Amino acid sequence: MMNKSSRSVLTFKGGIAPEGNGKDMSSAIPTRNAPLLERYRVLLQENAGKPPKPVVAKGDKVKKYQLIAAADGFVSANLHAPTSGEVVGIVRVPGPMGLMTEAIEIAADGEDSGDAPFAPLDWSKASPQELLARVADAGLVGMGGASFPTHVKLTIPPGKKVDTLILNGAECEPYLTADHRLLLENGEALLRGALTFGRILGVENISIGVEINKIDAIEYLSRIAADCGVRIVPLEVRYPQGSEKHLIRAIAGREVPSGGLPADAGCVVQNVGTAVALDNAVRLGIPLVERIVTVTGEVVRNPGNWRLRIGTPVIKAIELADGVLCEPGKLILGGPMMGFAQRSFEIPVAKNTSGILLLPPRVSMNYMPTECIRCGRCVQGCPMHLMPCLLATAIEGDRYDLAAQNHVMDCIECGSCAYVCPAHRPLVQHFRRAKAELRSRNRK
Amino acid sequence: MNLISAAAPLSVPASGAEILLWAGVVMASLGVVLGAVIGIFAKYFRVRSDARVELILELLPGANCGGCGQAGCADFAKSVVEGRNAPSKCPVSSREQKSAIARALGIEEEAGFQRRALVRCGGDLHHSAWLLNYNGVLDCASAALVSGGPKGCSYGCLGMGNCARKCPFGAIEIVDHIALVHPELCVGCGLCIAACPRHCIALVPAAATTHVYCNSPEKGIDKRKNCQVGCIGCRKCERTVPGKFTVEGNLARVNYELAPEELPTDADAVAVKCPTHALLSEQAHFRIEQNEEIR
């Protein structure tokens, strides 16, 4: 089953195969550019870790690509102006986690002018240190969803050896096609980015994992990657194929130890979007200020992918897709499985916003959870080989110790268990609460 | 040896009287021997316990709430006898019970005062904004993780009853999605404080009968978007009744450090006449939340 030849379709054990994955709505339409807006609100807390410190003040004139907030500490990422204009101030906007967060508001002057702030580099000649510094300067973060600063991921802790680089083009979330379009349209930039990552890490073994529902992208990439040493790996259509740990399991055949990092298994995983952003930063010298976002859902009149600047309000993105057909039941940033439901349309697009999903009321209807009937479907579906039914029962009784013993901390919150649960139990919510509780206990 | 020889006659036919006699002898000698053993153990292996611990345990409420910081009432009684704790550390006992304990131990009575739990939020179903249709687990800690909870305010009571489930005295009731403390039932053990993920419960002196029912440090204008009864920091209370209230940032607070007789009373709430009804007397707040009165 785990045949490592590049022709066979690789996968991991467990997980689910969501039916009717909604990708057809937007996958065939080429990515469009978004027109310049009057106002952008760039969230300060873009990255996982510490938010960067603003370096501009109210009334300042900024150029496109100018640094507007500088990384505060190691686990933090730079922010750059998405267009030229004037800083309106630091405003409070609804953040992707529902709480009010700070954002730098920029009123565009319409010129959209600015020079590339960094000198172009040749990836094959520049030293790994130079390239790593460029990653940090350009404010790169993981664009798959976790938004972890990329330079931190590329700094391998001492004592660990990395021999495999995996680029994540699986895009296992239903509905989303942003990475699919990126693979088709930015293939060469992606390969250059992949080789640049390889050069920074000193790794020769580079694979790009792509699910076989993107067969056109696999064929195209295999053609252009034939002589550059990057392997295109077809993966089975299975959720959560795009999870870091499961990609490593499927492609490298290794297991990331419980509580460990991918580096413990000798691997580094990067999103394909991040690789393209890296190529832009190295070859053109421009920081990360825009990304491809899928605006989709049954409710959206004209779904598709757009190249949106960081800080574009979600409502403007929905207007680009000609608005909605009916009152949406739910707005989700990200995919339907792991994305977060939002309560405001004013949320700005962040570096990790892969999709803006509007679900109809019929799909997002609420179910009343009933008691666990011990059917074991969640156990079969759990890609981390946990026992969700047991964990949820323990957490319902406030037995966090029992949940910790049964490795609730290894839960990746993929939602496979809740998806298959016939009793509609809010399993992931229980695990999120238990993880938050256990983390706060460990801090004490 | 005695037993073996005693068993021997039984192998031959014996009369009923003989069997009875032997049985009596065996049981009596067993009793004597074991009694002697118990006597020896009681004399030489005795665990010396303090009779006062038992006495004090009887005077304590026996709720085992843990509010004193000890592992239940027995542990607290031991710590009091050993002088590690003052009787006033028990948050549940009434003043009379505390002085009875002090008298029993012959130690000086400490001037402690009764505390009560206060839910610093008045944003119930009718007065706060509902921004999302929450259908998850009915648990405050879980709800707080979903987009910051269904209510617009991210500092106020979520009203899903984590505190009420924790309260060993049944003093907290959830009315219209807000926790309401029944003052006559609350003993001030403080267990609810740790249960609240929003940290909006505080222990305050029971002598104070007027409180600020708001916990949000946000600006007044931001608060008003989400809650009609949030404190907007207008400083009216500070000006009307000097000394009893302080406005820090955008939030008024009662100066609970004052001496019990100086703490704000119902009359102060009437005098202030808070424009947003964030500052209310305990009675008025209670009547409003029970829907007996409209703000």
Image (tube, coloured by chain):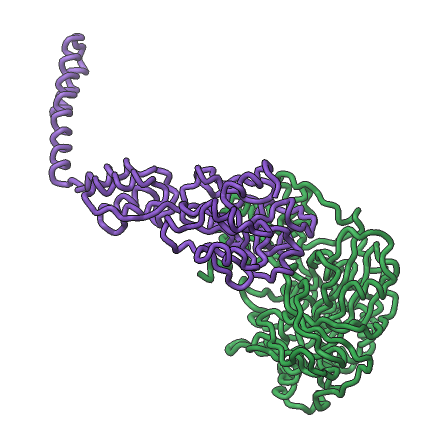
User: In the drawing, does residue A414 fall left or right of residue B200?
Assistant: right
Q: Quadrant of the C terminus of chain A?
A: bottom left
Near-viewer residue (B85 or A72): B85
Near-viewer residue (A43 or A357): A43
Near-viewer residue (A324 or A22): A324
Q: Position of residue A223 (x, y in %)?
A: 83, 76
User: In the drawing, does residue B18 fall left or right of residue B257?
Assistant: left
Q: Position of residue A435 (x, y in %)?
A: 55, 56
Query: Across the whole image, how many numbered discs are drawn on residues?
Result: 0
Question: Can I make out residue A167 in this image?
Answer: no
Which residue is located at x 82 percent, y 75 percent? A36
Instruction: Please name the color used to draw chain A.
Output: green
Q: Would you identify the image quadrant in which residue A261 lies?
A: bottom right
User: In the drawing, does residue A323 fall left or right of residue B107?
Assistant: right
Question: Can I make out residue A53 in this image?
Answer: yes
Near-viewer residue (B58 or A368): B58
Task: Give the chain ID for the purple colour.
Answer: B
A35 shown above or below A117: above
A210 shown above or below A275: above
Which residue is located at x 23 percent, y 43 percent? B102
Q: Where is residue A155 in the image (x, y as percent from the top left)?
A: 58, 78
Q: Position of residue A401 (x, y in %)?
A: 47, 51
Q: In which quarter of the image is the N terminus of chain A?
A: bottom right
B286 shown above or below A230: above
